[in-house]
Amino acid sequence: MINSSDYFIKFQWSHLFDEIKKFSLQYIKDESSFGNHTVVAWPELPDSIVALLPIRPDLLQVFRVRPNVAGGIHKDGVGRLCALNVPLSGSDGSIFQWYADSPEIVENFIPTAPARRLAIYSEHGLPMPIVETQTELPTLVNNNSWHRVNNVANSEFRWTASVRFNGNPTFANVNAALLKMGQTPQ
Ligand SMILES: [Fe+2]
């Protein structure tokens, strides 16, 4: 049975998420000069935020997705089991979708290292997502299952801060650590 809590956990805003957002907002810049779904910055997290996290982070990325486009379906690949996403701007109309290991997906993926990407930008012939969620709250996401960001119905740029953790802990492990430090699921 499909259980959405194996794919995403949404959290209420807290001091931790507010600080990540405040720090990351400075990387929102000119919208015209980037591609559809782009990492615009890989800043080092300040010690004050590292100290708030329950597991040492090794990467912060600031993502930007254009209005009215969908990202390609992919798994994040080696060393990328999960990510903690903090919405910065334009996330209310955006959806995060997961797909089963269906023949349509598995037979069409294009292997690249370290990520495995399947770029399907048309909805034609695409299987239905098995799980999806809006992205308006801080969300721990499982990146080890086929997924994409769907911004098709959103007329705004979606900006997101995404934290990865040192040692590539599992989705379940990061979720347990966040709960243990007192973060509140939605
Ligand atoms: Fe991803």
Image: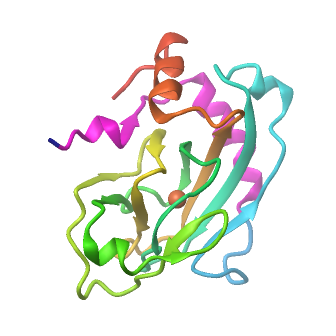
Q: Relative to 121, does residue 16 appear above or below in the rendering?
A: above
The residue under the point 35% across, 43% down is 7
Residue 67 horizontal side relative to residue 132, left or right: right
Residue 185 horizontal side relative to residue 66, left or right: left
Q: Is residue 87 magenta?
A: no
Q: Is residue 23 magenta?
A: yes
The residue under the point 19% across, 44% down is 2
The residue under the point 74% across, 44% down is 59
Q: Relative to 4, does residue 177 appear above or below in the rendering?
A: above
Magenta range = 2-28
Residue 122 horizontal side relative to residue 117, left or right: left
Assign the N terminus to one quadrant of the image.
Answer: top left
**Quadrant in the picture for residue 167:** top right
Image coordinates of residue 68 in percent, x first then y, are 41, 80
Image coordinates of residue 53 in percent, x first then y, are 67, 23
Q: Relative to 22, does residue 16 appear above or below in the rendering?
A: above
Image coordinates of residue 41 in percent, x first then y, are 77, 60
Assign the C terminus to one quadrant of the image.
Answer: top left
* Residue 153 makes an appearance in the image: no
Query: Total number of numbered labels?
Result: 0
Image coordinates of residue 185 in percent, x first then y, are 37, 25
Of residue 4 and residue 42, the one placed in the foreground of this image is: 4
**Quadrant in the picture for residue 49:** top right
Q: Relative to 94, does residue 18 appear above or below in the rendering?
A: above
